[in-house]
Amino acid sequence: MPDLVIETYELTKVFQGIGQRIVAVNEVSIKVPSGVVFGLLGPNGAGKSTLLSMLIGLTLPTKGGGKVLGYDIVKESLEIRKRVGILPERIGFYEHLTPVRNLTLIGKLNGLSGKELEDRIKHVLRMVGLSEHMHKNVGAFSRGMRQRLGLACALLKDPDLLLLDEPTAGIDPEGVKVFRGLVRDLSREGRTIVISTHLLRELGPLCTHIAIMKEGRILVQGAVKEIFEDFLLKRGFTYDISLSEVADQGIVEEIKELGNVVDVQLKGRDLIVRSKVDLGDELYDMLTKRGYRLRKFTMRKPTLEDVFLYYSRGEGTNEVG
Ligand SMILES: Nc1ncnc2c1ncn2[C@@H]1O[C@H](COP(=O)(O)OP(=O)(O)OP(=O)(O)O)[C@@H](O)[C@H]1O
Ligand SMILES: [Mg+2]
């Protein structure tokens, strides 16, 4: 497998309507390394589904191009669709058939048959927690059950790369937990998983890499760890400190003398210090040397929402890592 399982360059999609022109995907160059869990994160209308659809050749780019598993997304999309497990945004099933029958048809289209296909179907239905329902008609399925069946379809050909568009849409919290476990297992097996979502809190923790997308553009992309480090360097560090006794105002000046301090707030025993660089050790040493006993000393950890808001407001630069 290539080191980069997905690579696009200036991939663009313009939808031309009557009297309007929508740039759904705007010069997107993404890189997805092999073996990562990649979150394509963005609000409704950001262009996530259009981007995924271009990667598998279901939507033709207006400009730019790309490769998936080394295959050209325009000229070799058939090869891509053969190899990639896809959960599209809207998935249709034969309503009057059971999940097993639906999966059998899809499996046959993908060149599977006989005992191998039977075993595989049982396995994927178990993976997504649908074993109990395997003899019901899909017409009687709830939205969450359909979504799980969609996932089972994506897993059927045992793919090395999965593209999952809003995989937890309509799935209940228990199902989301199962899904997260499933993604972790699949990732541990060395597969690459791309998840598009706007549910930062629900699926963000799964991702080792992310791209933040808004209005057709990628605002930042890279390894989550590096994006957070970069965010901290740009936004600064915040410490929440609680002393065991009330401090006098002099301490504010002393902290400022450490240098690179943006702001110090003192309220009784509580201090909030904001700095441009990581001052944790120096601040801790200084306070303890002055004889203060510390009831609390923590650095605020930014969340994915903080990072998302920062970049989507246009405060960050383009690329990290
Ligand atoms: N077939 C189409 N014809 C015209 N405009 C389209 C078409 N498909 C998508 N769009 C427009 O392109 C933009 C991006 O849509 P897209 O569905 O890719 O966003 P998304 O990030 O997947 O959103 P969501 O989170 O709601 O699924 C939107 O403005 C949408 O209205
Ligand atoms: Mg979408």
Image: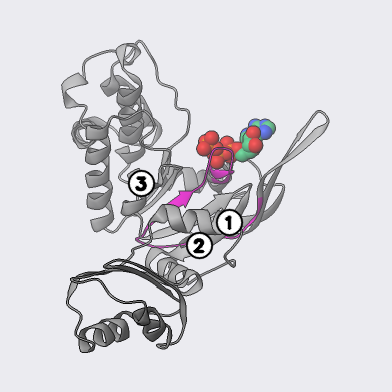
Asked if the stretch drawn in magenta spans residue 177, the answer is no
Relative height, residue 210 to residue 155 (above, below): below
| Disc 1/disc 3 C-alpha distance (Å) | 20 Å
**Part of the protein shown in magenta:** 26-51
Q: Type of residue at label 3?
A: Arg
Instruction: Identify the residue at image location x=31%, y=37%.
Output: 156
Judge from the rendering whether residue 203 lies leftward or rightward of residue 52; answer left or right: left
Query: Which residue is the extreme one toward the front?
Result: 248
Residue that label 1 marks: 218
Crowding near the residue tagged with mark 3, few <14, some 14–19, many ≥20 C-alpha atoms within 10 Å? few
Towards the viewer: 307 or 94:
307
**What number is the disc on residue 7?**
none
Report how many numbered discs are placed on residues in the image: 3
Towards the viewer: 172 or 149:
172
Q: Type of residue at label 2?
A: Gln
Instruction: Identify the residue at image location x=55%, y=51%.
Output: 213
Residue that label 3 marks: 201
Q: Label 3 CB, ligand 1: below 8 Å?
A: no
Towards the viewer: 89 or 191:
89
Asked if the stretch drawn in magenta spans residue 39, the answer is yes
Instruction: Identify the residue at image location x=59%, y=60%.
Output: 29
Query: Are the residues flagged by discs 2 and 3 in contact, CB closer than 8 Å?
Result: no
Residue 33 location, quadrant: bottom left
Residue 234: percent from left, percent from top? 51, 72
Residue 1 location, quadrant: bottom left
Q: Is residue 160 visible?
A: no
Q: Type of residue at label 1?
A: Ile
Relative height, residue 69 to residue 122 (above, below): below
Residue that label 2 marks: 221
| Disc 2/disc 3 C-alpha distance (Å) | 18 Å
**Ligand 1, what quadrant?**
top right
